[in-house]
Image: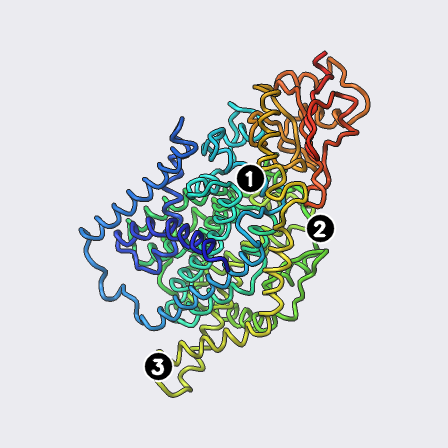
Amino acid sequence: MDAPASLLVAGTLVGLLLPGYLLLRGLRIPPIVALGAGPAMLAGALTPLTIRLTGSLATGDGWAVTAWAVAGVMALVGLILWALSPRLAAAEREPSRLLLGVALGALVLSCVITTYQVLDGMGALDVPLQRRDSVSHYNAIAGIFNEWGTVHPLETRGWMVGATGSVSFYPSTFHALAAAIPVSQAVVAGNVLAIVTTLVWIIGLTSLARVLFPGHPGAWIAAPLLTLATLSFPFIPMFRQGQWPFGLALALTPGLLALLVHSVRSRSIPGGLAVILGLAGIISAHPSGAAVFAAVVFAAALVELIERAAARSGRVRRQPVMPLAVALLIFVGGLAGSVIASRVPSVISMGSYSRPQTPALELTGSMVSFGHFSVNEPFPIAPAVGLMVLLIIGSAVAVRHPSRAFFLAGLIFFVFLLLTPLEATIADVTGAFWYGDPERILAVLSMFTILAAALGAGWLAERIAPRVSGDREIVRGGVSLLIVALALSITWLDRHHARADVIVRGNYQASFTSPYFVGGPAWNEGDGEFWETAAGMVGDEAVMTDSASGGVLLPAMVNVRAVPAVTTFSSMPPHGQEAAWMLRDPDPLPADSAACVFLHENDIRWIYLQHARDTRFAASHFRSTLVAPHGELVKKDGPRELWRIDDCWN
């Protein structure tokens, strides 16, 4: 593992964790909870700044300095609060520092192994992920780096597609955080934050296991180690699909859930306020983050109502989770919300977007095996048999465990997953937060399956440890490690190969067109010379290109209207879609056509294309033979071509 790359990843992780951790410790939140929720605090603090800041403070070095200043102020406030606030009561401190130390050791080991797998698969931090989503995110980061874009979430989509001034929400927190990393290339910044996001996920799961299962320390130890066998998250979204905003929101979720559970149990008002701040950070990273919290709260309300009904029948009930009125309000509100959503066309459209018709049985197999479904690369279920045993035991224990409300939320998401193959309105509504994508729902479910298996390991350890002689704490820790090692031993070789080689190395590759990036923000001297000349020709006029030509934005030409390299154009207005298609047709564009109106309104006079052979972008939308009837080739340099559009302008 490359030492400078490892140090950059470690430094970025500390920068993301430390300010929020110190703030929460100042509020006397226990260390392990503060560690898990710390990154969400910083994301939440930066959220209002991305909306309010303008000018130089929202882009380039000005934004980086602002972000680091906010982090410094947050850390300072935490230290001041720590000095002024009373210490934790003895009952609130960790009951076993030895077992917590073992859990933290397992956490560090998992983070080191995961970082090694990713860096080994990448080869280097400046090798790009060859996916359309990731190219878009690389260029969004580059836009902030180079000061031709801002961190404002209502402006990002505008300057990304050449419609500066238009208002349309696009989550920008990932790009804002990446642009604050002290590196010079957007590719490096994006890759570093993608790795750090996976580590935040592991830390958050460890924190949540500690809060949910206080009587099962084996679960604290098992949770981070079990992440070494999972595929659906974070490896698929972060290192195959390039769904980084979604991945960041989900990675922040376990740690903030730990803070939520702790705050509810301890009736901590400062903790509750911190949850609100962190939730703002998660939603700004990706709106789907709100759905996980909503499901957990809804499940808690449902459990409360069921237990109250059981109490009236004479059964002994546990301590109330929430007031009855609040539970009823949440329950009725959730049902009403789903009914209202089923009547909203935009929700239905988003939920029905490009839904793969994967059979429910295959989806279930992927979930219980901690794997992932793939037509071209089936991940076998058999190697996960040890993990599946822990999952079954943990699921059975969870039925009567105080954490059952959390796992009921997991059951809700499992129902969502089973609905995805259906052509039904309810499937559209439940899938709206994830564009009807079962891959993303599987990613969410991985949080529940990992913690259920961890609970199974913890329960087994508590049953076996009393039968072994020796110091009680040492035996519990040793038995827990042995159980997890046995479960992982069957899975390790298969999953290590799948994570490092199939997923990461199979998708991170330099282009044969450019050794640095497919026309994106990291270019060599030859690229730079081409862009300087082309930018001089284009001036302030607009350029149309596609992601197959190297990205949603070109580094020297700001005003770019991008079209996908595939046949879905949902991000473009209808007239833009028509123009993109007609510029591939041999017939000239009629002067009075909607396509010409679109070109005139957006001042689009140029087309850039690049022959991106041997990359993930081989299927270009624009090609020389298709564009030739509509314009003139004015500059060519190897695979790069700049065409002037004659149709509509003569």
Q: Nearer the viewer, residue 152 or 439?
A: 152
Q: Which residue is mark 2?
A: 357
Q: Position of residue 569 (x, y in %)?
A: 67, 33
Cα–Cα gap, marks 1 and 3: 56 Å
Q: Which mark is residue 522?
A: 1
Tell me: residue 452, above or below residue 157. below
Tell me: residue 313, above or below residue 415. below
For the point 71% across and 15% down, which residue is it?
A: 648
Residue type at numbered disc 2: Gln
For the point 22% across and 53% down, which residue is it?
A: 82
Q: Residues within 10 Å of mark 2 (few under 14, many from 20)?
A: few
Q: Position of residue 73 (x, y in %)?
A: 28, 42
Helix, strand or loop for disc 1: loop
For the point 47% across and 45% down, which residue is it?
A: 290
Helix, strand or loop for disc 2: loop
In the rendered view, does 434 fall on the left or right side of 84? right
Q: Quadrant of residue 77?
A: top left
Q: Which residue is mark 3?
A: 472
Dots 1, 2 in contact, CB < 8 A: no
Q: Quadrant of residue 346?
A: top right
In the rendered view, does 609 fall on the left or right side of 391? right
Residue type at numbered disc 1: Ala
Q: Nearer the viewer, residue 528 or 265?
A: 528
As drawn, the residue found furthest toward the right would be: 586
Q: Nearer the viewer, residue 279 or 626?
A: 626
Residue type at numbered disc 3: Arg
Cα–Cα gap, marks 1 and 2: 38 Å
In the rendered view, does 53 fall on the left or right side of 163? left
